[in-house]
Amino acid sequence: MGKTLIAKDKLEQCITECIAPFGLTAKLDTDFAYYYMKDLVTFSLFTFDCVNDFMLDAESRFPKVFGISPFMWALFHEVGHHETGDDLTDEEIELSKQIKESINSEDPNSRLLYFTCPDEYAATEWAGCFIEEHLTEVEEMWNKIAYALGKFYQANDIVDE
Ligand SMILES: [Zn+2]
């Protein structure tokens, strides 16, 4: 991101509040990701890579969770990596690595293999269970985040295209 963004700290603080109970900090970046060594989750504005594939996978596995923002799904998916990472066996970690290396991002069918990776599957599983059990709380979190995002776009003259 080239230009200096106004009130970036405030936005990050708002999102950090939602994941602080898990010992995590949120920072704005170009995509959602989890950084194991830093207890850090990054988030992006508007959307993220393969959002449609991601949501199809998540919502088909958790049909009771309906109408939750992709932002919240992605945020708790990253928390899910944090919460489930230590439970993965060496074999599962190796398999995840192999599958990810084999994916041809140009091929939509190949891209779907991503969701079969044991680490990705476990992270979404954790996220879905968490959201299902804390539906009202997650909706309230999203209201706060959506408001903060709106303010942030306004302050920085960012327009959703
Ligand atoms: Zn993931």
Image: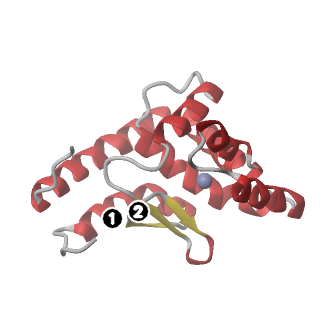
The reply, left or right, for residue 9 in relation to residue 30 is left
Q: Is residue 160 above or below residue 109?
A: below
Q: Position of residue 20 (x, y in %)?
A: 48, 63
In the rendered view of the protein, which quadrant contains the C terminus? top left
SS for callout 2: helix
Instruction: Mark 1 and mark 2 in contact? Answer it, CB < 8 Å.
Output: yes
Disc 1 to disc 2, C-alpha distance:
6 Å
Disc 1 marks a residue whose amino acid type is Glu
The reply, left or right, for residue 157 in relation to residue 91 is left
Residue located at (64% from left, 50% from top): 104
Q: Residue furthest front?
A: 106
Q: Position of residue 112 (x, y in %)?
A: 65, 39
Residue located at (44% from left, 44% from top): 72
In the rendered view of the protein, which quadrant contains the N terminus? bottom left
How packed mark 1 is, by other alpha carbons closer than 10 Å (few <14, some 14-19, many 20 or more), is some
* Residue that badge 2 annotates: 16
Q: Position of residue 109 (x, y in %)?
A: 65, 36
Q: Is residue 134 among the parts visible in the rendering? A: no
Does label 1 point to a residue whose CB lies under 8 Å from ligand 1?
no
Q: Nearer the viewer, residue 95 or 128?
A: 95
The reply, left or right, for residue 149 in relation to residue 117 is left
Dividing the picture into quadrants, the one containing residue 140 is top left
SS for callout 1: helix
Q: Is residue 118 among the parts visible in the rendering? A: yes
* Residue that badge 1 annotates: 12
Disc 2 marks a residue whose amino acid type is Thr
Q: Is residue 138 above or below residue 12?
A: above
Q: Nearer the viewer, residue 103 or 70?
A: 103
